[in-house]
Image (tube, rainbow, N blue to C red):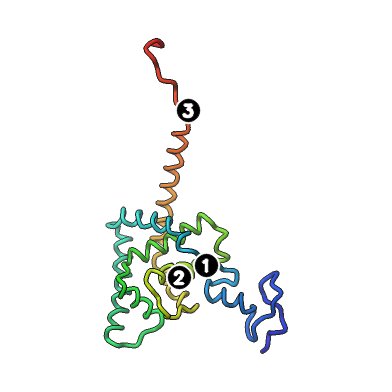
């Protein structure tokens, strides 16, 4: 099947499709990299404040059962991949990345914080991610970016596996972090409004 005579499936794109795909080469590359043909790279600097906020919330609730269970399970994933690598066992590309993160001492809390940070960013700028799958890829890229990657490939299947694992296993925890962040924001807004209310003039002795 040769699709090179057809226009790219993305609306408004006049380029021709690849031989067997629905998209032109630039949009196909974006699909593989970001989970959507219109996806964009989420800069670490753009999400850093949200990651820091998520980390503070997680640390404040470090003894909560949901947080401790997520940390324990993620540590198991990292440890298992690391042990398989050290024992010379066959690894999937996904396990290779988990092993790499473990080798660079990436902690489960780091992974949870960047995942929640991406979701907090998404809520603040809901137009950034073209479709739901985009934030799954963004979470995976943020997690895999916690340690030097060298020339280790980061294909779409790996991104889907890593991001999908985090979203499927820890979505409830991430949503709890989001709710806590919203409560904090509401508190700060209320405090800001209170501070902006004109104060009554100071009472002087003459007015008594």
Disc 1 from disc 2: Cα separation: 9 Å
Disc 2 from disc 3: Cα separation: 47 Å
- Residue 118, percent across and down? 46, 61
Numbered circle sitting on residue 141: 2
- Tags 3 and 1 touching, CB below 8 Å: no
114 with respect to 14 (left or right): left
Disc 3 from disc 1: Cα separation: 44 Å
Decide: few, some or many residues near mark 1? Use Cα within 10 Å; few <14, some 14-19, many ≥20: some
- Residue 208, percent across and down? 38, 11
Quadrant, the N terminus? bottom right
Residue 40, above or below 195? below
State the residue at coordinates (40%, 63%).
114
* Residue designated by label 1: 41
Numbered circle sitting on residue 107: none
121 with respect to 106 (left or right): right
| Picture quadrant of residue 175 | bottom left
Residue found at the far bottom of this picture: 1
Numbered circle sitting on residue 198: 3
> In front here: 74 or 26?
26
Residue 94, above or below 133? below
Q: Secondary structure at mark 3?
A: loop
Decide: few, some or many residues near mark 3? Use Cα within 10 Å; few <14, some 14-19, many ≥20: few
Decide: few, some or many residues near mark 2? Use Cα within 10 Å; few <14, some 14-19, many ≥20: many
State the residue at coordinates (50%, 56%).
123
Q: Secondary structure at mark 1?
A: loop
58 with respect to 186 (left or right): left
> In front here: 163 or 32?
32
Of the residues under marks 1 and 2, which one precedes in the sequence?
1
- Tags 1 and 2 touching, CB below 8 Å: yes
């Amino acid at each position: 099947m040769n699709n090179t005579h057809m226009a790219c499936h993305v609306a408004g794109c006049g380029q021709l499709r690849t031989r067997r795909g629905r998209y032109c080469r630039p949009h196909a590359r974006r699909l593989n990299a970001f989970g959507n043909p219109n996806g964009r790279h989420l800069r670490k600097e753009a999400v850093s404040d949200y990651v820091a906020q998520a980390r503070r919330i997680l640390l404040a609730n470090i003894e909560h059962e949901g947080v401790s269970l997520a940390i324990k399970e993620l540590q198991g994933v990292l440890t298992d991949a690391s042990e398989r690598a050290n024992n010379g066992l066959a690894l999937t590309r996904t396990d290779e990345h988990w092993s790499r993160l473990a080798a660079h001492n990436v902690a489960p809390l780091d992974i949870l914080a960047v995942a929640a940070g991406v979701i907090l960013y998404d809520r603040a700028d809901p137009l950034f991610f073209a479709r739901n799958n985009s934030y799954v890829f963004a979470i995976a890229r943020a997690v895999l970016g916690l340690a030097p990657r060298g020339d280790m490939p980061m294909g779409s299947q790996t991104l889907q596996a890593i991001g999908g694992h985090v979203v499927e296993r820890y979505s409830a925890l991430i949503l709890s972090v989001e709710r806590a962040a919203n409560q904090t924001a509401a508190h700060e807004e209320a405090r800001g409004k209170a501070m902006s209310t004109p104060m009554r003039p100071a009472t002087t002795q003459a007015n008594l």
